[in-house]
Image (spheres, rainbow, N blue to C red):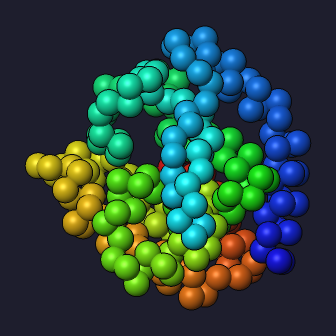
Amino acid sequence: MSKRLFDWVMSSLGLLALGPLLILIALVVKLDSPGPVFFRQERVGRFGVPFRIHKFRTMRHDPAGSGLQITVGADRRITRVGQFLRGSKLDELPQLIDVWQGTMSLVGPRPEVPRYVAHYPAALRDKVLSVRPGITDIASIEYRDESAVLARAADPERAYIDEVLPHKLALAASYVDQASVWLDIRLILRTIGAIVRSG
């Protein structure tokens, strides 16, 4: 309950404080390329319940949903504005809506698409999905350059499933074992520090 209260209070304050910035980014995304402001994609949430995540759209609009569900290197689908939003992580800000609604937490294992959750080992699947997915976590900090790492692989999707995903799951399981509001605060500060340093 304390974690949910913390999430609700902080997401409410965040949406209020960042409202003008969110509106500005929405306008820029709309003017930069045709398509919706938000990227809505099905992800797997707590207890395996699917939900549709909110992110600012950073790629060309693709109603058919073709292409990989991971981003590899200098992906040609990424728009001009999208490149900046991804680098600064501003594309993730709309997930405050998901936190406010209760489908996500500020901190928790990053939510995956069903295609990759299908590769979770049974024991880890139950543990990782026992908590709400988060905007940030330890893996988000360690894999900030994930797309560049995958770009060096002969088969990026296979490399993600066989190498990156198991490590992310191990980090997520470790977080679940230690989860607390104080740990969340530390990880939020680490995330902000990582963004500032890379900027």
- Residue 198 appears in the picture as rendered: yes
> Residue at image x 43%, y 75%?
125
Question: Which residue is rendered at x = 83% and y = 77% of the image?
Answer: 1
Relative height, residue 120 to residue 23 (above, below): below
**Residue 80 position in % (x across, y down):** 46, 21
Q: Residue at x 72, y 72 (%)?
A: 185
Toward the bottom, the furthest residue is 177
- x and y percentages locating residue 39 in the rendered image: 55, 33
Q: Extreme left residue here?
A: 154
Is residue 184 rendered to the left or right of residue 163? right
Using the image, determine if residue 86 lies above or below residue 63. below
Quarter occupied by residue 136: bottom right
Residue 151 placed where, x, y %?
Answer: 23, 45
- In the rendered view, would you say 179 is above or below 185? below
Q: How many marks?
A: 0
For the question of whether residue 144 can be seen, the reply is no
144 horizontally vs 118: left or right: right
Q: Nearer the viewer, residue 178 or 102?
A: 102
Q: Residue at x 59, y 21 (%)?
A: 36
Left or right relative to 137: residue 144: left
- Classify the position of the C terminus by image quarter: top right
- The percent position of residue 3, horizontal first and vertical second, equals 78, 74
Q: Nearer the viewer, residue 157 or 145?
A: 157
